[in-house]
Amino acid sequence: MWDCCPNFGASPQMLEEFSWSTGLGVPLSCPNSMLGRQPSGPSDFILLSLFYSGLIQLSVLLGHFRGQFIITYRPDRIEINRLHREMHVPAIAETEAVYYPILAAIGLPVNLLAIVILSRGKCGLSKCITRYLVAMATADLLVIVCNVILYRIAHLYWGDTFLFYTPVCRFILFLAPTATDSSVWLTVAFTFDRFVAISCQKLKTKYCTEKTSLVIIVTLSALFGLKNIPRPFVYVPYPYVTINNIPWGCLVSSQFYILPTWIAFSWIEQLLTPLLPFCLILLFNALTVRRILVASRARRSLRDLSNGENDKDPEMKNRRRSIVLLFAISGSFILLWMTTVVYFLYYRISGVFHRRSLFNPFATFEQAGILLQLLSSCTNTAIYTVTQSKFREELLNVIKYPFTLIGKLVK
């Protein structure tokens, strides 16, 4: 056992102090990829730090370095080896390696386009609605940058960069959930705003205004920034690993699974996103549909009395446009977040949460939910294009503009 990198800097006496166990009486075997040679690069030091400390949660590390290491569960030991190209890679890992770059390549430009087009205010939507949609597009853009590029793509392709200095990755792990929370709750706020506009005529004049929407957007962003302040403290550096005297990596602390305070924080976090928003959006949409059905009957009666003159009612046109937009956005959110919500309910009810630190039998289902929920950061622009004719016109103008400008310069 002591033949594994004897010059790593740890004496046999120090190594004797470790339990050499995962906590279940299963000893760790020496990393085969490190036998008889010196460590080179941060990845080797991370692998060794895992080997020298049997108390690290193996599945958490594997989640952080998916595609770089493989963990094999044997009857008498757990083997940890560097993953070579010829080894079998799980299908979900292969999917992520392709999916996340494509998602980033699409998500960045489409959200930027949505922000530019909606900010011009020429899409035939009220200022109140426009404010919400611009804020949602901005939050989705931040999700793509922080969660997809700086976190997930970085773990797949940039494992040895400054992004994995502990202070940097902690900051990224603060920004990523803040952006996600803001995106989700802005969708809830928009859904509630449309519910008020359709169902609460007395409250509509005071609530559905540009000023109110700005206050709600700023308040939600600030609240979820404050809510995620404890998030960086969930993570600890890899033991015995420093690069340029700076701690390296972000592992979920074992205290996160043990201390009542952190367990309560985890419950609150998961309830706030996505369970409560999911239920609220379903509720507001159900109430809105009920109100629309009642209003439709009344409109039909009036139309019969006026011989169909109300078919060209501009108020009905605007209302129909906002209703289609509302149901498209909220319906997309419900479909794409449903897998995550089902997984949350399952592992909380079944108690899988307390076993995740070693092995999660439904990791693929969890990762599939993450793939779908991140896709929701790119769908709104497509929804605007399909449901809003003026948005399509503005989108075509924006696409044509560079070619028009080049044509003028050539002339």
Image: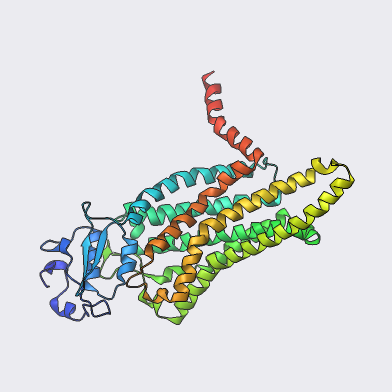
The residue located at (45%, 60%) in the rendering is: 369
Residue 291 as seen in the image, left or right of residue 374: right
Q: Residue furthest top?
A: 411
What is the count of numbered marks?
Answer: 0
Q: Nearer the viewer, residue 237 or 346?
A: 346
The residue located at (49%, 66%) in the rendering is: 342
Q: Nearer the viewer, residue 180 or 342?
A: 342
Residue 267 as seen in the image, left or right of residue 165: right
Name the spot of residue 344 as percent of width and height, x first.
48, 68
Q: Quadrant of the N terminus?
A: bottom left
Name the spot of residue 376 as percent of width and height, x first.
52, 53
Q: Nearer the viewer, residue 127 or 293?
A: 293
Name the spot of residue 182 as percent of width and height, x first.
56, 60
Does residue 203 lie above or below 405 as drawn? below
The residue located at (31%, 66%) in the rendering is: 61
Image-quadrant location for residue 17: bottom left
Image-quadrant location for residue 331: bottom right
The residue located at (12%, 69%) in the rendering is: 6
Name the spot of residue 322 as percent of width and height, x first.
69, 49
Q: Quadrant of the C terminus?
A: top right
Q: How is the image coloured?
A: rainbow
Residue 397 as seen in the image, left or right of residue 152: right
Does residue 49 lie above or below 394 as drawn? below
Q: Nearer the viewer, residue 233 or 195?
A: 195
Residue 248 visible in the shown view: no
Residue 217 visible in the shown view: yes
